[in-house]
Image (tube, helix red, strand yellow):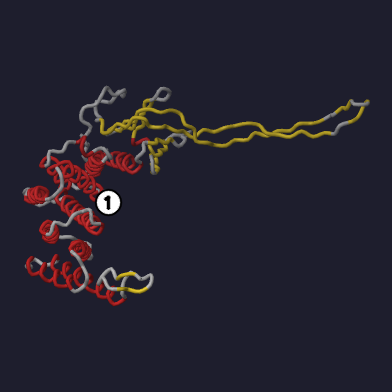
Amino acid sequence: MGSCKHCGQKAGFLRRSHKDCDNTHQAGRQRMVAMVAQAAGQSHFSEDALLGDLETIAAGSYIDDDGIRAAIAEGWHQAVREGLADGILTQDEEARLRDFREQFTIEEQNKAAHTAVADLDRAARDRVMLDARLAALATTPGDDHLDDLADTLEASEFSVAERRLLLIQAWEAAVEGSLEDGVLSLDEENALIRYLRRFDLEQRDVDANGAYHNMIKSAVIREAAEGLIPERLGELPPIPFNLMKSEQLVWVIDGVDYYEVKTRRERRGTSHGVSIRVAKGLYYRPSTFSSRPVEWEETVHEDTGILGVTSKHIYFHGPRKRFRIRYDRIVSFDPYQDGIGVMRDAQNARPQTFLTGDGWFIFNLVTNLAHHW
């Protein structure tokens, strides 16, 4: 005859608890969890009053001290879920929830508490990331938004390394967002640069995924579209182009695959005839053969080298091919996802293709320079 795990009285053959005791225990625990969740979501509550109410419910619901602690952890987890239900965790909500956890010493070893802590950290990071992205693109005068962001990070629970990583990722996301319309305004560029300076971030810090390079390329496109000659290259190794005095180097790309369209020719034909037996095992076959020329075009990889874009020409320098093309000698530009194609103004001209890896950039750069210069 087993005993009830709640009240300790006889429960019956092979039974561990009374149904009524189970219901009382479950109802009491649910009340405690709801009470904790409500308190954790409030700005002000009485800790003594909450604990007194929890102990009273626990006493009538067969709940021991461990059960009280578990109910507090689950109630706090529920408060975190409710705080995240609208998709936004404000700084005040975060501070209130973290203070509640510290006040009641809710340990992460509890499964519900562990999940809640992870959710809270993730939501806090998302909020700070959004604040940082907005600060990186804020074009209003002054640095108040950057100072506010610095204060937010200082008050957060992120480590120094985590803060730096967050700042870098937010800047990269800001660059990506600013390029969604294909244009980086001068105000946006200046805001992004101020952000880097304010938080002591270098080009190498934010260019691991190409974000800094993308910002510069977008600025180059903007200046070319405005009829300016971009000067964004900085220091370069010796360039194998013999530039004219009247032109200026704008951009250089190494490792560019160069393709040309070639015409291939061959003769194809058939033979006709019959075999005539002249002796055992010996045959004679008189036949005729006719053929015709066949031509077709194919795109052939000719070389891999350096592509230079100037205010007047497209230059290419490779082990086998070296040439330049004046913009006013190009009759058409063909955009590709990973490069650009051009057709010269010549009687025997064939399409020429340069695969640069970034078709949007090279097409917009070359066409804008050709239009203005």
Viewer-closest of 223 and 68: 68
Quarter of image, res 251: top left
Viewer-closest of 282 and 4: 4
Circle 1 — which element?
loop
Q: Residues within 10 Å of mark 1 (few under 14, many from 20)?
A: few
Q: Which residue lies under the disc numbered 1? A: 180
Quarter of image, res 345: top left
Image quadrant where one finds the N terminus:
bottom left
Residue at 28% of width from left, 68% of height from top? 5
**Farthest residue toward the front?**
1
Left or right? Give the position of 138 relative to 86. Answer: left
Residue at 40% of width from left, 38% of height from top? 342
**Farthest residue toward the right?**
279
Q: How many marks?
A: 1
- Residue 26: x, y in percent? 26, 72
Residue at 31% of width from left, 43% of height from top? 364
Residue at 54% of width from left, 36% of height from top? 297
Viewer-closest of 22 and 319: 22
